Amino acid sequence: MSERIRVVLFSIAVVTLSVFITQSKLGKNANLAAYDQLLNRVAPKPAPIEDKIAIIGIDDESYDKLDAPLLLYVGFFAKIINALADAGATIVVFDINPAASLEKVAPQIDLEFMKSMKRANDMGTRVYLGFKSGKIGGLMPHRKFLFASNWQIGFTDMFPDDDGLRRRQEFWTEGPENSLVPSLSMTAATARMGIDITDKEKICARFEVCENGKPKQRLIDYRISQEKVVMHQFHKVLEKAENRTSLKDDFGGKVVFIGSWTDKLPDNWRVPHPIGNLDKLHTPGLAIQVQNVLTQISPVHFEEPSENSMLLATIILSVLSVTLMFKLQPSHSSFILTSVAVAWIAVVVYSFSKYLVLPVAPVVYGLFLPSGLARSYLYVSQGKQQKVLKKFFGSYISPEVMKDILKNPEKVNFDGSLVDITIVFTDIRNFTTLSEKLSPVDVTRGLNRYLSAMTRCITESGGYVNRYLGDGILALYGAPAPLPNRGALEAVKGGLAMLKALEELNKEELFPGVSGLKIGIGIHTGKAIVGNVGCFEKMDYTVIGDAANLSSRVEGLTKQYGVPILISEATYEIVKDAVEVKYVDSVKVKGREHETAVYTVVSLKGEKI
């Protein structure tokens, strides 16, 4: 199978995988996480001013003061319903399900509750009871309460996402004979807007909660403020009702929610955005029901693109990602992909401010996942080629050179390149005579210590040790990696560092019986050919040209003039503003027509001599 066919098959597999993951739980969770961030960080449009909704909450103080089981609360509810009807409340919705009857222990309390509902309905204050639908463990109000309320009910179910957060709400479900069974919040919204709760067609048109005649979940806009929605403590309202104090100022003409507002009752949920000063990890279900109403009556709603649109976006982005990775250099493809991702995120943020919720999963799994897999494929497929290169070029002494070859294998050849660099030669004075007086062990042991110290000075100053020449060193500054100003100043710093290191080495005898070891350092800056020289059996990375020869000859002059370091005129012109030097001489170097001035370096400017 050809490489081209393998790439095509691999690309198809990657695109398929991207689509699958985007549509999976991973993709959905990525979209949810992004939605939460946007919900908390993107400023909302002005929220509708809502002063026609009120809350009567059973908070901690009310629960403690009443000190009664929830089963007996129907008696309290009866008194409050009567007072709300007298106050002219539009509708009373209970986010508490009276599922049990007190018929056997306190039938009078049940009777008072039923009478209050009938009286309120007769006076124009409709009472709706909450219930759990069959979708999430059905639980209906007791049948006699249902009859008393004239079957005015609304389901209170929350519809959590996979992570347990309540982001969406289904506002109605289908009942017998294609009838509409509303959520508790839908009953309040229709009452607030003056829409008949049984008019399915009008509800679908006004609230946009239908799709092809079926229920459609809607994102709850938690950014809409409940600042104008007042929460009244249950026990204080009950106290006013018992004292026959008018509640008209607080509840007249309003939709009134009654329910739990405490952690002591099991009706608290996690939401992606705090409602007022409530804890978003323990938000009362009653507050969420009110938020549902505000979402429905708001003139604008969050919209989401269809799944087919997200599927198409994923395919396009994943194909683009794979194509770029195989066609362009990694740096170029990464730049383009990053630009596309940034543009997508910018569009997502802007669209969110316009109430359009776009997904981020196509970017995460349709753009970056394919690019990562494609890069891994290239890494593995190129591994074989790199093994061949290592086989032939393993004789390189420089890991930097090997790295460059592996990075650009197509450029491997025997041709060099002309570069402007600084070349350093150094060797030990009279080493040949010295070594003849020592044993081989003493020579190699001392030489290894010396070369180790000098190499450290070179590499730490930015140079590259090209080779060891017995007791000498050939170092390059500016190749294979370029340096500012052709590496001249770095080379001088490296030379001075070598002299300081030698002083430390001379405190102890490197070679038995030898004290005051001296070296010579020659530095020259110029153009030279740097590249691969040799054959497949043996290759070397070396420097060739007049600049290399001149550097060697400058080093040889250090002994003649009795100085440890000399730099050429070319190097001096580059570093003269940074170093203190002394002019030594102008010399005629073998192989060159014109004389060359040489200088000895005293110190860096600003350093004590």
Image: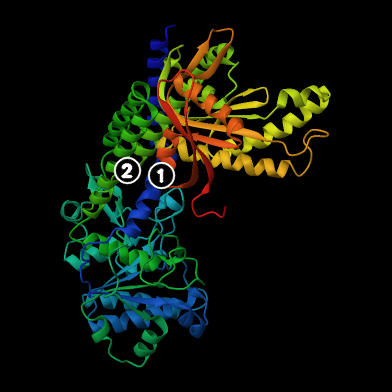
Q: Residue 185 vs residue 373: left or right?
A: left
Residue 157 location (% of width, % of height): 39, 57
Q: State whether residue 57 is above or below residue 23.
A: below
Q: Amino acid at mark 1?
A: Ala
Residue 146 appears in the figure: no
Q: How many marks?
A: 2
Residue underneath mark 2? 359
Q: State whether residue 260 is above or below residue 37.
A: below
Residue underneath mark 1? 30
Taking the spot 21% from the left edge, 53% from the top edge, the residue there is 354
State if disc 1 and disc 2 touch (CB < 8 Å).
yes
Distance between mark 2 and mark 1 Cα atoms: 8 Å
Residue 4 location (% of width, % of height): 38, 11
Residue 44 appears in the figure: yes
Q: Residue 514 vs residue 182: left or right?
A: right
Badge 2: how crowded within 10 Å, few (<14), some, or many (20+)? Answer: many
Mark 1 or mark 2, which is nearer the start of the sequence?
1
The kind of secondary structure element at disc 2 is: loop
The kind of secondary structure element at disc 1 is: helix
Q: Nearer the viewer, residue 402 or 23?
A: 402
Q: State whether residue 11 is above or below residue 198.
A: above
Colouring: rainbow
